Image (cartoon, rainbow, N blue to C red):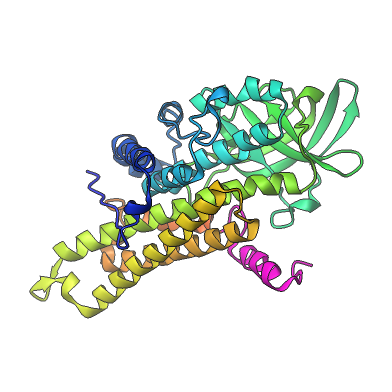
Amino acid sequence: MDVFQHPDYYLLDELLSDEHKIVRDATRDWVKRSVSPIIEDCAQRAAFPQHLVKEMGEVGLFGPYIPEEYGGPGLDHISYGLMMQEVERGDSGIRSTCSVQSSLVMFPIYAYGSEEQKQRFLPKLATGEYLGSFGLTEPNFGSNPGGMTTSFKDAGDYVILNGAKMWISNAPFCHVAIVWAKNEEGRIKGLIVERGMEGFTTPETHNKWSLRASATGELVFDNVKVPKVNILPGRDGLGAPLSCLDSARFGIAWGAIGAAMDCYDTALRYAKERIQFGKPIAGFQLQQKKLAEMITEITKAQLLTFRLGQLKNDGRASSAQISMAKRNNVDMAIHIAREARQILGGMGITGDFSIMRHMMNLESVITYEGTHDIHLLITGLDITGENAFV
């Protein structure tokens, strides 16, 4: 039974609008109803709960900030953040599905697509009829996406696409993929590649210890004919996919707090109930130290993301600010997961509790959408003006 209660040590609920709280609570109810009862079994079996995709569309988790004219609910970015917080409280892999769909597929179509592309794809992505994926990372190019070798050549009304992308969430089941590739002049452009195009395959990645309830795979292109009307016309260059990553990283910064909250809530409840040496272990100094540090770090992360959400709503959040929040909050969450596991002792490694699953999931979250170290260099570049990447 999911008995989660969210910590709010600094009374941040007072800063949220009524709409924010309604959106958050509705998402929390959905997680408790549809995710929590099945997620441990899915993780144990390494099975993606594909039936949840339509439900996620029904409750508005896909493209929350997309305007109503294109099928979205038209919410603000704090609402999006709160939704991702609640979903990742359930599972990082399920939040990954939402983040990819919203920030990496719907966002580039909305921001850089033609009107025809928006009308054709966004409503179906919003409802979950279509599931999308985002192809940027390659076998030899992760933190250096500009070195990509996936490319396309002009062929009249079509282009011919060749190459491969890997570590792609949603890939095995996606209907469309936003693929970033270089044209014959070496310029990066976004293409909408559709399931069924000849030469387009999506082999699944197996044997993962992390994000086991999320579908991960490759995108492989063997002379795929992509109509030119499927090329995103609004923006090209490396800045285009990086802007999508900004949106995804924003959601992750919020989502990681959800995972941390769940670990903290589980550890606190267990510490109050577990009796050793004649009293609850919550009464011992070292356990109180762990719990006090957890709630302190969660509270700091909540304040960081709330302010970031305000800046995002105003169109003033910089890439560097988003990077700082992603790096800080995921690092915070993974440390809290490890401390919480210790409070539970041996029980902490079992599937009877969520902590070990969160811990394994966060090992992926701390690496994808920009690694822990890369985000540090982004902050370093921003404050010094010196590029340490090359």
Q: Position of residue 247 (x, y in %)?
A: 59, 46
286 to 210, vertically: above or below: below
Q: Residue at x 74, y 23 (%)?
A: 198
Read off the magenta span: 367-390
Image position of 280 (left or right of 70): left
Image position of 115 (left or right of 45): right
Q: Quadrant of residue 101?
A: top right
* Closest to the observer, 122 or 166: 122
- Quadrant of the image containing the C terminus: bottom right
Q: Position of residue 190 (x, y in %)?
A: 75, 36
- Quadrant of the image containing the N terminus: top left
Q: Residue at x 81, y 46 (%)?
A: 149
Whether residue 176 appears in magenta in the rendering, the answer is no
Image position of 28 (left or right of 226): left
Q: Is residue 363 at all visible to an observer of this figure?
A: yes
Q: Residue at x 32, y 62 (%)?
A: 10
